[in-house]
Image (tube, rainbow, N blue to C red):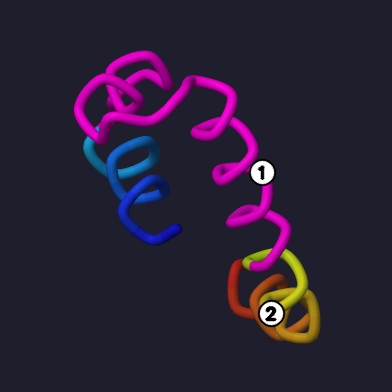
């Protein structure tokens, strides 16, 4: 999951490029990216208030 997220969000590759590079389907990339984002949201939600406080 980390590899897919890193390639998409940090390296800026498209889902198609990631799929070709990793030898998986584009739908697998989409699903994995969705799940990774969902996990990040769940883990970061408790800290949002603190983050917003420091961004003011």
Please give left or right for residue 24 compared with residue 37 in the image. Answer: left
Residue 10 percent across, percent down from the top left: 29, 44
- Which residue is at 28% across, 18% downward? 17
Using the image as rendered, state which of residue 13 and residue 52 is in the foreground. Answer: 13
Q: Earlier in the sequence, mark 1 or mark 2?
A: 1
Please give left or right for residue 24 compared with residue 40 in the image. Answer: left
Instruction: Report the residue marked by disc 1.
Output: 34
Above or below, comparing residue 33 to residue 53 in the picture? above
Residue 4 percent across, percent down from the top left: 38, 46
Q: Quadrant of residue 51?
A: bottom right
Secondary structure category for the residue under label 2: helix
Number of numbered discs on residues: 2
Q: Residues within 10 Å of mark 2 (few under 14, many from 20)?
A: few
Q: Quadrant of the C terminus?
A: bottom right
Please give left or right for residue 3 compared with residue 33 in the image. Answer: left
What's drawn in magenta, residue-wise? 12-39
Above or below, comparing residue 37 to residue 33 in the picture? below
Residue 50 percent across, percent down from the top left: 71, 85
- Which residue is at 45% across, 58% downward? 1
- Please give the label number shown on residue 43: 2
Please give left or right for residue 46 compared with residue 37 in the image. Answer: right
Using the image as rendered, state which of residue 22 and residue 42 is in the foreground. Answer: 22
> Would residue 50 be counted in the magenta stretch?
no
> Would residue 16 be counted in the magenta stretch?
yes
Main secondary structure type of the part rendered in magenta:
helix
């Amino acid at each position: 999951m980390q590899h897919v997220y890193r390639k998409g969000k940090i390296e800026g590759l498209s889902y198609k490029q990631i799929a070709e590079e990793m030898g998986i389907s584009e739908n697998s990339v989409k699903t994995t990216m969705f799940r990774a984002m969902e996990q990040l949201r769940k883990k970061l939600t408790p800290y949002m208030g603190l983050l917003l406080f420091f961004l003011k």
